[in-house]
Amino acid sequence: MSFYESKRNRNKKESSSQVTSRVFIMRDGTERKANRVIVPNKQLKDKVDIHPLNPRYQEALTEEALSDILPSIREVGVTFEGVAEYINGKYLLLDSSRRLAAAELTGSDLPLWAFDEDANLSRTDAEYITEISRLHRPLSRREHGLPLVKAIANDSSLEDYSVLLQKFRFKPTQERTVRRYVSAASLPQELIDLFPDSEGIPNDYYDSLKAICKAIGKKKHVTQGKFEHDIYYFARLKPTLLEWLNKYPISVEQSLETSEKQQIILQELKALVNNKQTVKVATWSTPDRIYDKTKHTYAELTRHKNGKEIQIRCRQLNKIQETQLIELLRSFNG
């Protein structure tokens, strides 16, 4: 039975009993014991941190990025334990960074399965746990790449992709994928932060954003050398890119769904770099006349594309009609 299966299959039946420890089965079949702890909300900032091997980009975990789990956590708290390593008085999260952010936002406690320092958790074990956590929400291409970019910054020999592949145990056939990870992680954070739920953007957006950056660089005569690594090119391009972004602020209607906001922002960026006027996406339906007495006496209904809002516009209603409409709306409180 795998780590994830043992955790998932027993979670439901154990939740009703006070289980205080659990043995986890690692990839190589070895067993590691963890103890159950609950970290009170008021102690989260002092006692909990993200494990160095956890690749989730914590700063991107806004309320919008957590919208899939916040409602249930607000209602019943965090019910699914995270996994952490207890080192030097802190619980370092190997997974559950999204649950930590949600707990901080909702004032909830955080339950954990914690490995003690004497558990001798190996790097391979820790990496396996973080890998399993991606089953809940897969890492973005950028999140995959951030640890690689950090490693390259600390060891220039890893600029050679053959060395990087070997170091992080990728197959030679995965070089193109790894190059995409590194490229996505090299893009300036300020560009990524334009998007709501920035680590949740579709992976093909990174290709478009790279093309946008290169187009801006070409306009400003900051081009990438033939053998220049993406990391160094985008670092060199960053001041020019930020200057360009400051000249063209982008805003979207907040009532739209997150995916729609992301799409509109990408369209705006493409249009700006190509000097084209963007086609605004209609957010309200065409007015439908639900009462049409005369040319100047009518009521119109429009619906928002999010399906949650309507607008009623009335003109020249008499006092009786106005009173009837107001009383009808007030009756909804009952």
Image (cartoon, helix red, strand yellow):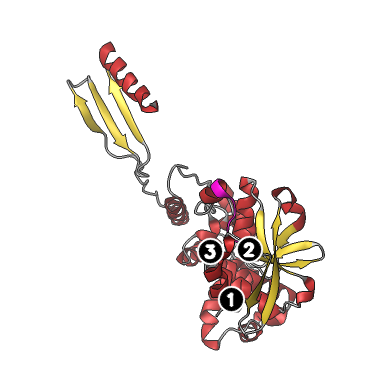
Q: Quadrant of the C terminus?
A: top left
User: On the rendered structure, is 324 left or right of 128?
Assistant: left
- The residue that mark 3 highlights is 12
Residue at 64% across, 49% down? 108
Question: Taking 334 as reference, is 316 above or below it?
Answer: above
As for residue 312 lying within the magenta part, the answer is no
Looking at the picture, how far across and down is residue 297, in whole percent? 22, 19
> What's the residue type where badge 1 is placed?
Phe
User: On the rendered structure, is 170 left or right of 297?
Assistant: right
User: Which label sits on residue 145?
Assistant: none
- The residue that mark 2 highlights is 82
Q: Nearer the viewer, mark 2 or mark 3?
A: 3
As drawn, which residue projects farthest toward the top? 319
Q: Quadrant of the N terminus?
A: bottom right
Q: What stretch of residues is rendered in magenta?
A: 75-81
Looking at the picture, how far across and down is residue 329, in whole percent? 34, 24
- The residue that mark 1 highlights is 3
Q: Identify the mark nearer the N-term, 1 or 2.
A: 1
As drawn, which residue projects farthest toward the right? 88
> What's the residue type where badge 3 is placed?
Lys
Looking at the picture, how far across and down is residue 134, in whole percent? 55, 69
Of residues 288 and 11, the one drawn nearer to the viewer in this rendering: 11
Looking at the rendered structure, the secondary structure element under dot 3 is: helix
Occupied quadrant, residue 169: bottom right
Q: Work out whether residue 223 can be spotted.
A: no
